[in-house]
Image (tube, rainbow, N blue to C red):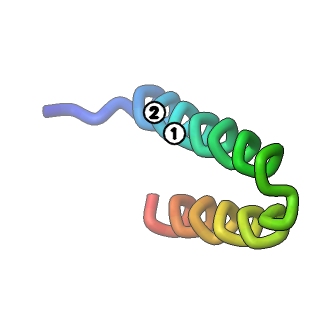
Amino acid sequence: MTYNYYMKSETETRVVGLLAVLIGILMIIYPQLVGYLVGVFLIAYGLLKIFS
């Protein structure tokens, strides 16, 4: 099984985009969670970059 860098990059971009949309919806519904959700998103994104 071969791993294509382009496929991995496209999948990662799709996952990050989906998370961004979900977090954006939550920010609209619960404005007081903005700081908390941004922090969680940045930690998740950082871990994705470190372990990729």
Q: CA distance from mark 1 to mark 2?
A: 6 Å
23 up-or-down from 15: above or below: below
Residue at label 1?
A: 15
Check the picture and name the quadrant holding the C terminus. Answer: bottom left
Which of 26/16 is in front?
26
Examine the image and state in which quarter residue 37 appears. bottom right
Q: Secondary structure at mark 2?
A: helix
Picture residue at 35% right of the left edge, 30% below the top: 4
Picture residue at 68% right of the left edge, 43% below the top: 20
Residue 50 place in picture, x, y as percent: 53, 68
Residue 27 place in picture, x, y as percent: 79, 51
Picture residue at 71% right of the left edge, 48% below the top: 26
Of circles 1 and 2, the one toward us is: 1
- Amino acid carrying label 1: it is Val
Number of the label disc, if any, that sits on residue 38 = none
Residue 1 place in picture, x, y as percent: 13, 33
Residue at label 2?
A: 11
Picture residue at 68% right of the left edge, 36% below the top: 21
